[in-house]
Amino acid sequence: MNLLDTAAILLTLAAVFGYINHRVFRLPTSIGILLIGLGLSVLLLLFGGDDLRESADDFVSQIDFNETVMSVMLSFLLFAGALHVNLGDLRDQKWVVAILASVGLLVSTFLVGTVSYFVFSLTGLNVPYEWCLVFGSLISPTDPVAVLGILKKAKVPKSLETKITGESLFNDGVGVVVYLVLVGLAVGQKEASVGSVAHLFLVEVGGGLLLGAVVGYLAYWMLKTIDNYQIEVLITLALVMGGYQLASSWHLSGPLAMVVAGLMIGNQGRLMAMSDTTRKHLDLFWELIDEVLNALLFLLIGLEIFILEWSGPALIAGVIMIGVVLASRMVAVSLPVIILKRSKTFSPGVIRILTWGGLRGGISVALALALPKDGSLDEGVRQSILMATYVVVIFSIAVQGLSLKPVITRLMGPQEKRSEGSH
């Protein structure tokens, strides 16, 4: 089956599932598509005929989820997400976002990795500690995709929305770098010295931020010198595709580059380089791209159940890890409150909302599927990590995602909303 056939099937399934969700379930679109796809996949696995199951398994197996997400979808999704973040609001929350996306992510990686070592051992799974840390790194980044629409519908304060959005956009890029470092150490490809790790971080993270600023400014200059919305939309499309590929070829952080470029175009570019007509068409174009790719991403997550090698111990470990990941998340999001409480006032419900609103998604699954298959990692260990990741992600999207709005409503009364919105 060629690429066009695969894309046609996925788009058709996403459209049909989206229609069913809209007419019957009325869940948030991405979550509804995921749950419908997951439910039908489970029914097919349990009750479908051998030929039908084998055909579905072959179809899903030929899709390179990691390549699709990390090399195709992620650049568009991060740029589209950053495009609508107000730089002034982000500047007001810069220290909270910076601590969450760096120190908070590292703390979560260490806590999840360390506790998972004992959890895997208790369930009879022999997962080496270095690979437990890799699991911690891939499950710690939060996903901005599923939570943003829910936050807007819940009418949360802008400052809280900015905290969650900003953290999600930036910790995706940082999380991927941490993951690459830990995988390199686990397979013995990188030195475990502070200097070598710091150098990699400086090159990947710093280089990605700098490249994003450069290509973002170049695109901004081009937008400012013309007034033709078709060409201007094309420029932003070229910025995403060309900029991300350039970052990848130079071994820089493509995700961070796209976030910086999206912030530049969505703020300075929107205010100073676009006419009203261009702004309208640009927003419509990227909202459509965002919606279509979100639908496809969550459909793929639901279908990935076909490639899992089901194991009772790994499933139990995954269920236990749900609580471990949430507890580690709570510790991580408490850091900004502890560090900044002398200079900044926080609403009492913010820690719990940030904890529950830190959804895991497609990036975690993609990184788990990217674990080495060349013999440097035992296949049983790889499948255990993949199963645990999948269980945590499904719970995060289905349970946390669907319950986030009532949790916010319960934790933030009118007085707390005003308090949080004023700081």
Image (cartoon, grey):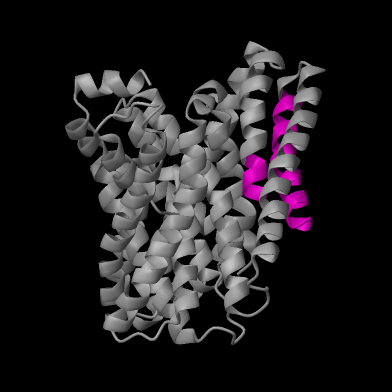
Out of 24 and 411, give the one closest to the viewer.
411
User: Can you say whether 181 is above or below 398 in the image?
Assistant: below
- At horizontal 58% and vertical 50% (from top left) the residue drawn is 173
Looking at the image, the residue that sits furthest to the top is: 276
Q: Residue at x 34, y 44 (%)?
A: 334
Q: Quadrant of residue 345?
A: top left
Q: Position of residue 236 (x, y in %)?
A: 70, 33
The picture quadrant where one finds residue 311 is: bottom left
Tally of marks: 0
The quadrant of the rendering that contains the N terminus is bottom right
In the rendered image, residue 108, in percent from the top left (x then y), is placed at 41, 57
Q: Which residues are magenta?
A: 230-258
Q: Is residue 278 left or right of residue 357?
A: right
Query: In the rendered image of this protein, does residue 107 appear above or below residue 288?
Result: below
Task: Work out whether residue 183 or residue 51 is closer to the camera in this orientation and state it.
Answer: 183
Q: Is residue 231 magenta?
A: yes
In this rendered view, identify the residue nearer to me: 349 or 399: 349
Q: Residue shown at 58%/30% (left/top)?
A: 83
Q: Is residue 30 magenta?
A: no
Look at the image and tell me whether residue 316 can be seen: yes
Residue 12 visible:
no
Q: Is residue 310 left or right of residue 12?
A: left
How far across and down, in percent of the image, does residue 58 sit? Answer: 50, 76
Quadrant occupied by the C terminus:
top left
Seen as rendered, the residue at the extreme front is: 342
Q: Main secondary structure of the magenta part?
A: helix
Residue 212 locus on image (x, y percent): 71, 39
- Decide: is 54 above or below 319: below
